[in-house]
Image (spheres, rainbow, N blue to C red):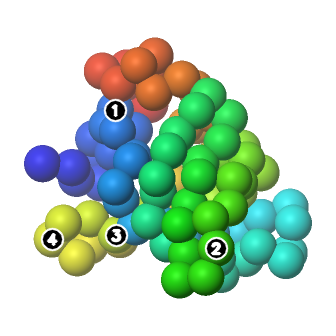
Amino acid sequence: MITAENIYSHEFIGMNAEIVQSSNPQIIGLNGRINNETKSMFTISTNKVVKSIPKAQSHWKFTLENKDTVIVDGTKIAKRPFDRIGAKA
């Protein structure tokens, strides 16, 4: 189960996310489900469109299965998923 303590070492595909802080003010508040993840990008499906957003330029709020929320600095997750999984934050 994904928790606030171990979120950095998990897969983000399928999770709900919202951008709460960004160097690009136009994307603050963008939210949706993460469809794909690469080293530097998330692909997010919103109600209207699918967007690719750089991880490192934003702070992300993730909603966990137990309805808790966690805010993650994108620079800490800007790695390839298989490099990040199992690594310490």
Q: Label 2 sits on what residue type?
A: Val
Q: Label 3 sits on what residue type?
A: Thr
Q: Residue at the location (12% across, 48% down)?
A: 1
How far, Cα to Cα, is label 2 from label 4?
Answer: 27 Å
Q: Along the horizontal axis of the image, is 83 left or right of 55?
A: left
How far, Cα to Cα, is label 3 from label 4?
Answer: 8 Å
- Which SS class for mark 2? loop
In the image, is residue 51 above or below residue 74?
A: below
Image depth: mark 1 or mark 2 in front = 2
Marks 3 and 2, the one that precedes in the sequence: 2
Q: Label 4 sits on what residue type?
A: Asn
- Which SS class for mark 3? strand
Q: Residue at the location (73% across, 47% down)?
A: 54
How far, Cα to Cα, is label 1 from label 2?
Answer: 28 Å
- Which SS class for mark 1? helix
Label 1 belongs to which residue?
Answer: 9
Mark 1, residues whose alpha carbon is within 10 Å: few (<14), some, or many (≥20)? some
Label 2 belongs to which residue?
Answer: 49
Marks 2 and 4, the one that precedes in the sequence: 2
Which of the labelled discs sits on residue 66, or is there none? 4
Which of the labelled discs sits on residue 63, or is there none? 3
Res. 24 image quadrant: bottom right
Q: Residue at the location (68% across, 35% down)?
A: 40
In the image, is residue 7 above or below residue 69?
A: above
Image depth: mark 3 or mark 2 in front = 2
Which of the labelled discs sits on residue 46, or is there none? none
Q: Residue at the location (39% across, 46% down)?
A: 12
Task: Pick the quarter of the image with the C terminus.
Answer: top left
Marks 1 and 2, the one that precedes in the sequence: 1
